[in-house]
């Protein structure tokens, strides 16, 4: 499967509901300080959209966001440009960018008191309906790659995979649910090993 437009969302746990507008100055600071590896361009406010993209940090290579899709908030990253390596390497790269953004957000003292990322669930999605349509065949083709990356993150047999929606009009989306929660930092170490 020649998929490059891949997204990974890490679900957040909020002790108190976060006002999404508080993320705008945080993401602007990330642009100013080069807080993440991508070429950061702008911040987009979609907080007015019900269960929408929330607050987006636009980059050349991909977009970061504190997203509300599906009624669940979380940090996501999705790639927009062609990625190097095989599909497992690409998915690992996108997963690492999402986890690094979680870790970086937890360093923001104004935000970190109310938000956590006890990573027990990830959502992986294709943002390219031509390369990976939402079909059983595409899911089966992607499955070995998902299992390889999930195995690195959570250990062999330490997770379950579930296709989220069978509607062909929706993106191919798979939820990885771990048996035990881990920190973004620990999962980054496992990915790098």
Image (cartoon, grey):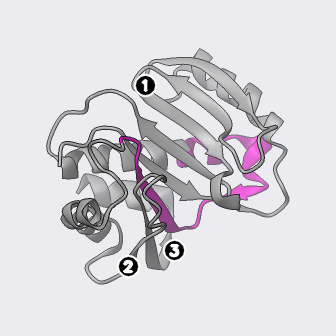
Crowd tier of the residue under label 2, counting other residues whose Cα lies within 10 Å: few below 14, some 14–19, many 20 or above: some
Which x, y percent locates residue 163? 41, 70
Distance between the alpha carbons at the discs numbered 2 and 1:
30 Å
> Does residue 106 belong to the magenta stretch?
yes
Distance between the alpha carbons at the discs numbered 3 and 1:
27 Å
Residue on which the image places disc 3: 181
Q: Earlier in the sequence, mark 2 or mark 1?
A: 1
- Would you say 168 lies left or right of 28 here? left
Rendered image: mark on residue 159? 2
Count of numbered circles on the image? 3
Q: Is residue 152 visible?
A: yes
Quadrant where the C terminus is found in the figure: bottom left
Check disc 3 and report its element: helix, strand or loop: strand
CB-based contact (under 8 Å), mark 3 and mark 2: no
- Would you say 193 lies left or right of 69 here? left
Residue in front for this viewpoint, 16 or 90: 90
Q: Earlier in the sequence, mark 3 or mark 2?
A: 2
Crowd tier of the residue under label 3, counting other residues whose Cα lies within 10 Å: few below 14, some 14–19, many 20 or above: some
For image coordinates 53% across by 28% down, the residue present is 35
Q: Which residues are magenta?
A: 102-128
**Residue sticking out furthest to the left:** 86
Residue 154 versus residue 122 in the image, above or below:
below
Q: Earlier in the sequence, mark 3 or mark 1?
A: 1
Check disc 1 and report its element: helix, strand or loop: loop
For image coordinates 61% across by 15% down, the residue present is 32
> Does residue 79 belong to the magenta stretch?
no
Residue on which the image places disc 1: 38
């Amino acid at each position: 499967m020649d998929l490059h437009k891949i997204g990974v969302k890490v679900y957040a746990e909020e002790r108190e509901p976060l006002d999404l507008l508080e993320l705008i100055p945080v993401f602007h600071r990330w642009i100013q300080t080069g807080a993440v590896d991508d070429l950061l361009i702008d911040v987009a406010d979609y907080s007015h959209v019900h269960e929408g993209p929330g607050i987006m940090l636009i980059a050349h290579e991909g977009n970061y966001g504190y997203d509300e899709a599906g009624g669940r908030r979380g940090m996501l990253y999705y790639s927009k440009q062609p990625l190097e390596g095989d599909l497992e390497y690409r998915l690992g790269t996108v997963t690492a960018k999402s986890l690094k953004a979680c870790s970086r957000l937890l360093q923001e003292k104004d935000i970190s008191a109310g938000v956590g990322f006890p990573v027990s669930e990830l959502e992986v999605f294709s943002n390219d309906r031509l390369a990976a349509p939402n079909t059983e065949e595409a899911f089966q083709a992607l499955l070995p790659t998902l299992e390889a990356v999930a195995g690195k993150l959570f250990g062999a047999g330490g997770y379950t995979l579930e296709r989220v929606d069978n509607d062909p009009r929706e993106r191919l989306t798979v939820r990885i649910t771990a048996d035990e929660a881990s920190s973004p930092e620990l999962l980054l170490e496992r990915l790098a090993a």
